[in-house]
Amino acid sequence: MSQEQAAWPIPLPNCVQVERRGAIAVLTLNRPDKRNALSDELVLGLQAFFSTIPSDVQGVVMCGAGDNFCAGLDLNELKETNTAESFDTCIIGQRLNETVQYCRVPVIAVLHGAVIGGGLELAASAHIRIAEQNTYYALPEGTRGIFLGSGGSVRLPRLIGASTVIDMMLSGRVYEATEAHQLLRLSQYLVEPGTGLEKGIALAEKIAKNAPLANFAVIQAVPRIVEQDPTSGLFTEMLMVGIAQGDDEAKKRLRDFLERKAGKVVRG
Ligand code: 1HE
């Protein structure tokens, strides 16, 4: 690993930058000269970050340095790989995105510029995506003669539909931010260029004020329930209700509302 940072519980490579904003950790993919392409060092650095989140961190905002979120896997490292080595690349990428999806705390991806291939796979693993208006998405795997390799063929069809994924991979179609937001629901928020990070931090701070067990239940249970048969899903739902509602924090929050000490639902 190259130059190390001191702030995180374990040393991280320079291509993974972390900044603490109170309870929120802002994570930056930091290889702007290579459009934040996912080298092994970057993937393993991100894995190290997500595996060592301190207990006082209540949310992660993930973004890219420079003009892009991420241009996908580092094609330089892929170009000479044999079959066995390609499995290794796949394993570390799949493991990273699994760790992101089942992170203890919510992960918000702030997207801008290129969100391509492995970059889209990473973004798809986050719990919420904020896209700046200049974001664009592509899966040029077909053109490059490769295949999604970091869990994208599992996650992306569930997010935007198999037909869209197949079209993007075969035709190299590029989706711009607005159509991806409106047609594909790929992002949950669409914001002006340069404002994504601020929005991401504000959202993460708001979410961090929720009951921690409720946040945990949402991010751990919902993606699992959608994969279960309905009967098992209903049972899992019931267990999560018991866990969340049985917590003192939930009792206090419900009481506060009824005693007019907590805010109402506010529109807009
Ligand atoms: C890279 C990569 C990369 C840029 N791996 N080095 N991903 C792709 O097919 C996308 C490939 N990248 C691009 O199409 C363009 O770079 C961008 C549209 C993202 C940006 O264009 P631009 O004009 O801003 O930058 P650039 O001049 O193309 O690139 C700047 C440098 O970044 C250059 O290196 P330099 O040493 O010549 O300066 C590029 O080589 C480098 N660079 N992208 C390595 N991806 C098994 S699963 C795989 C799934 C995938 O991810 S497939 C999609 C791969």
Image (cartoon, grey):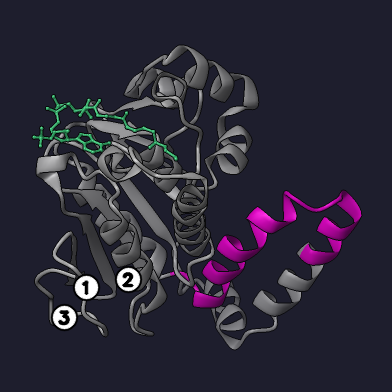
Is 220 covered by the magenta stretch? yes
| Circles 3 and 2: CB atoms closer than 8 Å | no
Residue 93 figure quarter: bottom left
Categorize mark 2 by other alpha carbons within 10 Å: few (<14), some (14-19), many (20+). many
Is residue 103 found left or right of 25 in the rendered image?
Answer: right
Extreme residue toward the right, this view: 231
Dot 1 or dot 3, earlier in sequence: 3
Residue 61 figure quarter: bottom left
Work out whether residue 268 can be spotted: no
Is 79 covered by the magenta stretch? no
Q: Quadrant of the N terminus?
A: bottom left
Categorize mark 1 by other alpha carbons within 10 Å: few (<14), some (14-19), many (20+). many
* Placement of 164 over or under 201, stated as above or below: above
Q: Real-space Cα distance between discs 1 and 3?
A: 9 Å
| Circles 1 and 2: CB atoms closer than 8 Å | yes
Position of residue 38 measured from the top left corner of the image (x, y, whole percent): 30, 48
In the image, the segment drawn in magenta is 210-236
Is residue 83 found left or right of 246 in the rendered image?
Answer: left
Q: Which mark is residue 49?
A: 2
Secondary structure of the residue carrying tag 3 is loop
Is residue 9 found left or right of 66 in the rendered image?
Answer: right
- Majority secondary structure in the magenta region: helix
Task: Name the foreground residue: 74 vs 71.
Answer: 74
Q: Report the amino acid beneath label 1.
A: Leu
Categorize mark 3 by other alpha carbons within 10 Å: few (<14), some (14-19), many (20+). few
* Placement of 45 over or under 175, stated as above or below: below
Is residue 185 found left or right of 65 in the rendered image?
Answer: right
Q: Quadrant of the C terminus?
A: top left
Q: Real-space Cα distance between discs 1 and 2?
A: 7 Å
Residue at which label 3 appears: 7
